Amino acid sequence: MESFFAPCPRGLESVLERELATIGAQRTEVKPGGVAFAGDLVLAMRANLESRIASRVLWRVGAGDYTNADDVYVGTRSLPWSDWFGAERTIRVDVAAIRSPLRSLDFVTLRIKDAVCDNLRDLDGQRPSVDTSRPDVRIHAFLDARRWTVYLDTSGEALFKRGWRASGGEAPLKENLAAGILMLSGWNAGTPLLYPMCGSGTFLVEAAQMSLLRAPGLKRTFGFQKLRPFDLQVFQRTKSALQAKVLRARPLPIFGSDRDEQVLELARHNLADAGLAEAVQLRCQDVLDATPPALTGLMIMNPPYGVRLGDEAQARALYPKLGDLLKQRFAGWRACIFTADAELPKLIHLKASRRTPLFNGAIECRLYEYRLVAGPLRRVRSVAEG
């Protein structure tokens, strides 16, 4: 039984915990910014392949007490690094800390790097090289007030990099945040989904992959493929079993639109690169001209806001019109709007049934849910509002 930690976008920790439990994670524990869990190395491979929410899967390989950087050096040098990789691998070390008494994290990073290199040199007569851009092995360390913990990154590139995106567009939402918003919204495959202002189409790709049972990691490689303890034959069997569950691409009740034809072309390219061109219906259309493609369904919106596009006046003028659109045309639907603009709930002139705090990187946001009913809108109270 090994120990792992999966970081994720802040606000999605509970969603990630449920997801990890479904693939067999044990002793799950929600922590700020992620979920700690236990399992074997096969579980780590599955988490990398199957998790839509995790940013990485970190394998805890050592921990100890410290009072200075030399303590961290001695503790990390004593770890059996050659059990995990050899000096032929390039490495990168990243250090994060909360309430650490040490003044320089850069110095601690250097000491951990020296500890790993000195350990492997003693055994192999050779020191691994450092590669900060595309390392074979990523080592993560975390310091609190008195403890250091070291992890090996089993993911390599961040897991929101699914391997399909041709280009990000102007202000893309990370894939794991989009998947988490879909899960928080309660959307299920088969429920009509409308995504106006679709941009590069991140929500569309994530929803289509969920509908077709495509594990998000099927088109990419992982850091654990360069670590000695992982059985790559087991990995290939695990990956093949997931591939066998994938449904054939077909037209789905997933709809996207954008008023900018160039932006829409980017969404088309991304869907095509993901093998989903026929699964999603796209049209060039202003959001205020949108009509419901079905009697009921879910509309997801990520309207532009000043932090992202630098035009607050334009964004603020849009909100009342969006509220009118939803009231007049989308009775029977639910709308989930993701935004960092605190003015939206005041200007849209609708009462949110739920408000969920989330973070888009370092930007604090909210996911607002609106349940749209025929006739005058009623206030729908929820646990989130008290």
Image: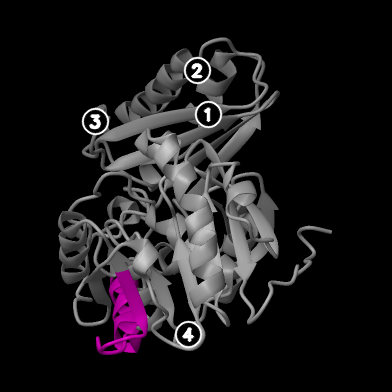
User: Label 1, on which residue?
Assistant: 96
User: Label 3, on which residue?
Assistant: 131
Helix, strand or loop under label 1: strand
Residue 266: image location, x then y, percent: 18, 58
Q: Earlier in the sequence, mark 2 or mark 3?
A: 2
Local crowd size for mark 3, using a 10 Å CA cut-off: few (<14), some (14–19), many (≥20) = some
Report the disc number at residue 302.
none
Report the disc number at residue 191.
4
Mark 3 touches mark 4? (CB < 8 Å):
no
Image height check: is 119 above or below 38?
Answer: above
**Residue 287 left/right relative to 381:** left
Q: Earlier in the sequence, mark 4 or mark 2?
A: 2
Image height check: is 10 above or below 63?
Answer: below
Q: Earlier in the sequence, mark 1 or mark 2?
A: 1
Q: Earlier in the sequence, mark 1 or mark 3?
A: 1
- Please tell me which residue is depicted at 58% across the width and 66% down the height of the picture: 184
Q: Is residue 12 visible?
A: no
Helix, strand or loop under label 3: loop
> Within the image, what quadrant is residue 24 found in?
bottom right
Mark 1 touches mark 2? (CB < 8 Å):
yes
Q: Nearer the viewer, residue 194 or 243?
A: 194
Q: Distance between the Cα atoms at labels 2 and 3? A: 18 Å
Q: Earlier in the sequence, mark 3 or mark 4?
A: 3
User: Label 2, on which residue?
Assistant: 105
Which kind of residue does numbered mark 2 sit on? Leu
What segment carries the magenta color? Answer: 233-256
Image height check: is 77 above or below 171?
Answer: above
Q: Distance between the Cα atoms at labels 3 and 4? A: 45 Å
Check residue 10 for magenta coloring: no
Nearer the viewer's eye, disc 4 or disc 2? 4
Which kind of residue does numbered mark 3 sit on? Asp
Q: Nearer the viewer, residue 348 or 124?
A: 348
